[in-house]
Amino acid sequence: MKFCLLVLCATAPMLTSFQRAQFDVANLAWLSGCWEGNYANGRTVSEQWMKPLGNVMMGMSRTVKDGKTIAFENVRLEQADDGSINYIANPSGQQEAQFRLVELAGTKVVFENPEHDYPQRIIYELVNRDSLSARIEGMIDGKIKESGFPYRRVRCE
């Protein structure tokens, strides 16, 4: 038993190091660029993501309807000292919310915060070079709700 604990303690720093290498903000570079979606409800949503630099990706979004901005959000994908990556959102008219990266597989990433009101999960997936799928999901009044946001790559201006 003592030997097992000794081995576990001796390898813990290596596991932390491995986990940091596994989840790196640089692995989210595929999200970089400008994206836009036009939806049936007359809304246009634009997202812009800067490339990873200094363990952070900066993003912002704007929702426009009938020529007026009705919502906006500033976002950081930030790598913490423990190697975790957090999606930190500052949406218009709401308090900051933080979601932890729980899955990163190629060009799909899932962030989660089960304690947040809605959403509890944020998912991005690069469908192809010019197509991005974003989705939010969670529970509202005991029922699962989700909203999808298909985007196409647009020129940054």
Image (tube, helix red, strand yellow):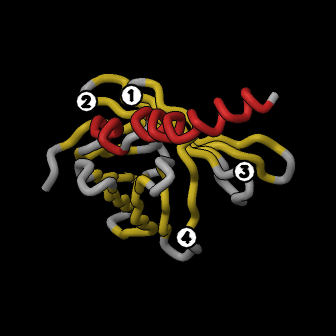
Residue position for label 4: 96
Q: How far across and down, in percent of the image, does residue 153 sit?
A: 25, 38
Amino acid on which the number 4 mark rests in the picture: Glu
Query: Between marks 4 and 3, how big is the CA–CA gap?
Result: 15 Å
Q: Quadrant of residue 143?
A: top right
Between residues 60 and 42, which one lies in front from this camera angle? 60
| Residue 60 placement (x, y as % from top left) | 35, 60
Residue 16, percent from left and from top: 51, 41
Does 156 sit above or below residue 64? above
Q: Earlier in the sequence, mark 4 or mark 3?
A: 4
Is 130 in front, or is 14?
14
List the residue tagged with mark 2: 130
Quadrant in the picture for the N terminus: top right
Of tags 3 and 2, the one toward the viewer is 3
Picture residue at 45% right of the left edge, 56% below the top: 81
Residue count near mark 4 (Cα–Cα under 10 Å), binned few <14, some 14–19, many ≥20: few
Mark 4 and mark 2 lie on one chain; the one further toward the N terminus is 4
Q: Horizontally, is 51 left or right of 60 in the view?
A: left
Q: Residue at x 46, y 25 (%)?
A: 105
In the picture of the structure, the residue carrying the numbered disc 1 is: 107
Residue type, mark 2 in image: Asp
Q: Is residue 155 left or right of residue 151?
A: left
Q: Secondary structure beneath disc 1?
A: loop
